[in-house]
Amino acid sequence: MLPAVPRAAYRVVNRTTMPPDEDLGAFRRASVNAAIVKAVGDAPVTRWYRGSAFNAVRRQLASLRGQLAANGGAVATTQADVDAARAAGTVAGILGVEGADAVGDDLERFDELAAGGVKVVGLIHLGHNQFGTTSMPWLQYVAAFPRRRPTSTGLTPLGRAAVARLDALGVVIDVAHADRSTTLDVVDLSTRPVISSHAGAAAAGDGAFARFLDDDELRAVASTGGVVGLWPYSHRGRGVATVAGLVDHARYIADLVGPEHLCIGTDMNGVPGLMDGYRGETDLPVITAALLGRGFDADETRGILGENIGRVLRTALA
């Protein structure tokens, strides 16, 4: 979550394709009662804050708490919180961190994050880090953020220790940006459901897009009881071009591993472009109709729209 000035600059660069900036009130307007909301812990974001990278994560989490409160919602740390938000028609925000670079080599910082309500952590984000390797190391192509290419891929010894620590804390691990080696390593080591919160199926779309998962990765995530988030991203020919294309991914993944391993991962405010026919959370009914139109029954569609990820998060919210 970038501060206002660099966020505005990013939006100017992508002004012809980027959807409008949404506040967290968008969830309520879209009748969404629970959503994972994330701070970002790697350099492209944390470097814009004064102080340490970890303090930048603290500040982002505090901002998310404030935004939720300002929009009639609250942080959910238990299943009862989620149930209460649904009953009241408000928003339960489940805190997460995308990119654990800011933790450094001090794994006790995961304890602090968990104690502060963080229930989801993506160890890897935009760059290779101390825990593992990313599927799309965008930073190595940007001179301002040089990164050395690692000599090997997958989880590092510290990454393996981090998986054990997060499992012990009951925190769900998100492999959305991890490469194949890191994804399979996490699945092999974790004793809990693993998610890929915003992704797609390589065989259902642009197979050259490294952010999409091959069949082995999809089966691996599903084998843990986890879910893959359907991602409405589209930019410069990558991602899914249309709502029908998104449902192609849903159909492919459902046929491969079952519809119970699908959810929606919009990556709100984090993408430079979205597919045609979808401009934000209030267009979720468009996705609902498209799923129903492609053979998903009402129960399966409800699962994709929230019940499946709710099942996974229930362990973290125990």
Image (tube, rainbow, N blue to C red):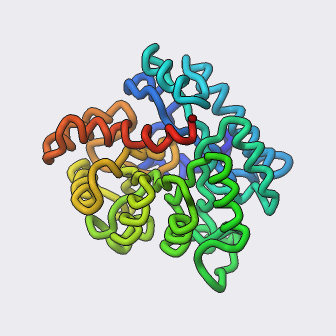
Residue at the spot x=36%, y=65% of the render? 219
- Looking at the rendered image, the quarter that the C terminus falls into is top right
Residue at the spot x=26%, y=65% of the render? 204
Is residue 210 shown left or right of residue 159? left
Position of residue 173 relative to residue 70, above or below, is below
- Looking at the rendered image, the quarter that the N terminus falls into is top right
Residue at the spot x=73%, y=51% of the render? 46
Q: Position of residue 181 (x, y in %)?
A: 52, 75
Q: Position of residue 307 (x, y in %)?
A: 37, 37
Q: Residue furthest right?
A: 51
Tell me if I can see residue 163 in this picture. Answer: yes
Tell me if I can see residue 7 in this picture. Answer: no
Position of residue 59 relative to residue 151, above or below, is above
Q: Residue furthest bottom?
A: 151
Position of residue 190 relative to residue 182, above or below, is above
Is residue 39 shown left or right of residue 52? left
Q: Position of residue 240 (x, y in %)?
A: 31, 57
